[in-house]
Amino acid sequence: MSFQDMEETNILYDSDETDIDKILQILTDQYVQEKEKLNNLRLQLQLSLQSPELSENIKRVAILKAEEQKLDQEIEQQMLDQHKAKIKSRIFRDLWVRKHISDTVDQCRNFLPKLRQEIQDTKDHITREKETLKETNIIHEVLSERIERQSDEHLSRESENCILKKELNDVKRSYNTLKKELVKFVDTHFPPHKLVREDMEEDYDDDYEDNINSSLKVLLEDLMNQSFNNPSEPYLYIDTNKVWPPYVETLICAGIARKHPQNTNKIALVEYHL
C-alpha cells in the first residue's frame, strides 16, 4: 500500500461511515449516467453507418470512437474507484470494530479492580451479617428460654393464686358460718339485758331513760371495730351506765377481753395468733 493509499485510509478512518455510503452512491449514479451516454453514442453510430452520407459519417464515427474510448476509460476508472471505495469501507469497518473491541476491553480492565473491591466488600458484609445472625439466634434462644420459664412461673403463680383463692373462699365460708353460729350462740345464751336504774351507778344522769338494752353482741362488735380501726389503741371505754357489767366480766373471765393496766374502765380484745 502506497503512502497516498495509507493517507486515504487514515482519512476514511477519521470520516463517518455514512459519508462513505454517500460517496459510493454518487459513484454508482455517475456510472449509470456514463453507461447511458455510451449506449446513446453507439446507437447514433449505428444510425450514421446506415446513412448515404458516408464521408461525413466517417468523421463522426472517428469522433464517436474517440468519445467511446474516453467514456470506456472513465467507466473503468469509476469501476476502479468504486472497488477501492468498497475495500476502504471494509478496512474502515474492520478498524472501527477493532477500535470498539479495544475500547471495550480497556473499559473492562478499568472496571475490574472496582468490581473486585465490590465483591470483597460484599463478602465482608455477608460475614458480618452471619455473625449478627448468629448473635441474634443466641439472643433468641435465651429470650425463648426466659419466656418459657416466665410462662411456667406465671402458670405456677396462677395455680397458686387459684389455690389461695379457693382457700380464701373456704375461709370466708367458714368465717361466715362461724359468725352466724357465734351470733346465734350469743343471741341464744346472752340475750340483750335491760338496764334499770338499780343496775347503774349512783351518779347517773337524770336524762337517761328508765330501761336501756345492753347487748353482748354489740359490745363484741364495738371491741372488734376498735381493734381493727385503731390497732395502736385497741382499748374501748366501757360506760357502765350503758353496758351491763356481768357481760364485761364474762368476756374477761373467758379470756376474750382484757382490762387496761391503768384504767379499769377500758377493755380490749385479746390478740389471737394461729
Image (tube, helix red, strand yellow):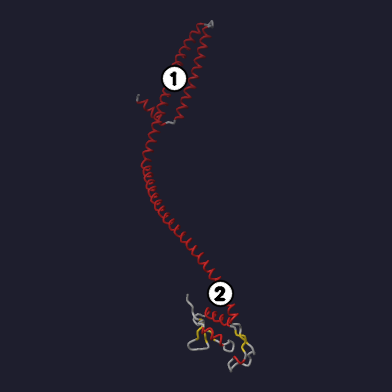
Say left or right for 234 vs 102. right
- Disc 1 crowd, CA 10 A, few/some/many (<14, 14-19, 20+): some
Q: Residue furthest bottom?
A: 202
Say left or right for 74 vs 223. left
Q: Earlier in the sequence, mark 1 or mark 2?
A: 1
**Amino acid type indicated by mark 2:** Leu
Determine the residue positioned at 41% across, 56% down.
142
Q: Secondary structure at mark 1?
A: helix
**Amino acid type indicated by mark 1:** Met
Q: Nearer the viewer, mark 1 or mark 2?
A: 2
Residue 46 in percent (x, y) is at 52, 9
Residue 146 in percent (x, y) is at 43, 58
Say left or right for 227 vs 119. right
Q: Are marks 1 and 2 in contact (CB under 8 Å)?
A: no
Which mark, residue 231?
A: none
Q: Quadrant of residue 174?
A: bottom right
Q: Quadrant of residue 70?
A: top left
Q: Which residue is mark 1?
A: 79
Q: Which residue is mark 2?
A: 178
Where 247 falls versus 32 (above or below)? below
Q: CA distance from mark 1 to mark 2?
A: 136 Å
Residue 7 in percent (x, y) is at 37, 28
Where 9 falls versus 268 (above or below)? above
